[in-house]
Image (spheres, grey):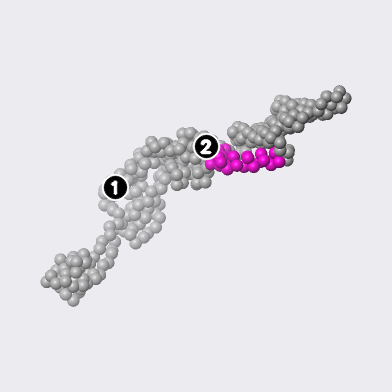
Amino acid sequence: MIMLRRLVAPTVFIVALAALANFGSVASERFGISPLSDQGRNALWMAGYLGIAWLLSRVADLVLSRMRPRNRPVPKLLRDLVSALLFIVAFVSGAMLLMGHSAGSALAGSTVVLALLGFAIRNVVADTLSGIALGLEAPFRIGDWVDIEGLARGRVIEIGWRTTRLLTRDSTYVILPNSQISRQRIVNYSAPRAEFRVQMEIVLDHATAADEGAEILQAALLKAPLIKQSPAPDVRIQSIETEGVRYAMRYWLERFDHEIDARDAIWREVDKALRRGGASAPIRRIRVFGDPSADLPPETAKVRVLGIGTDLHGHGSEPERPRVRATT
């Protein structure tokens, strides 16, 4: 009931204008008062347009204020934009009436003017509407660590109607238009919880048994700082490839800004564990085979691998293509 009281003032204003228009025609007949001139009637029409815009803006504000999409209130900026558009249409229509246009042409002209204005500030409107959409959807909040694909990765420090500001891990201040953010894939590392899991991969040589390699990596994870021990980190064998055995080291972090330091600490512990255990990453070995029918010294093979094109006697010749085999 209290909210409906906001409709009383514009309704009374419109009724008063209608009564004034009717009273003018009746008074001119009964009391001989000259009727309103064309400019006077146009002024009443302009006031009527403004009164209707006033009433419609109040109705729209009441409707939007009661809507709660996704359990979130509609931003006040959206209600203000609706009211502003209604008053702009009413004002332009009234101005065109005062300049001698008919009511229908005035409304049509105001629509054209509004379209031209919207085209001129389309980027600002797009950013603002995208900001409203981000406010309703709330894919991130201030303080969240986000990765906006192709744009930036950092912590959200301010969310505006036109732009969103991030602070990267390098302390770089990034300002992004909301219209660009709304078109990109957003990864929020702080929602629904601040903790998240990270996966790192490594390939060990076939000389190290798969079970032994997993135990070495698991011991390294348990010694690394910053990672959570509950849930406990684990090691999974991804595949057995020609280069070696591929492992995935999975662990949980409490905060996204710990990710770089945790990764560095884990690699250090992994290196120590591999050296203690005698394991290593795969090493590519290349063996060069020369002509089996000739007993050539090693430097000949070297010359042929480099492709210099000279024989042992220093004469130029087409270098023989060495046979190269890569083994692991």
Badge 1 crowding class, 10 Å Cα cut-off, few under 14, some 14 to 19, many 20 or more, is some
Instruction: Write the start and end of the magenta stretch as one range.
Output: 105-134
The answer to whether one can see residue 231 in this image is: no
Instruction: Tell me which residue sits at (34%, 54%) in the image.
Output: 203
Q: Quadrant of residue 48?
A: top right
Picture layout, residue 60 above or below residue 316:
above
Q: Which residue is mark 1?
A: 271
The disc label shown at residue 101, or none: none
Instruction: Tell me which residue sits at (73%, 38%) in the image.
Output: 103
> Which amino acid, mark 1?
Asp
Q: Position of residue 166 (x, y in %)?
A: 45, 37
* Residue lying furthest top: 31
Q: Is residue 183 magenta?
A: no
Placement of the N terminus among the 4 image quadrants: top right
Left or right of residue 270: residue 74:
right
Placement of the C terminus among the 4 image quadrants: bottom left
Q: Nearer the viewer, residue 313 or 263?
A: 313
The disc label shown at residue 162, or none: 2
Secondary element at image label 2: loop
Instruction: Tell me which residue sits at (78%, 28%) in the image.
Output: 36
Q: Quadrant of residue 35?
A: top right
Secondary element at image label 1: helix
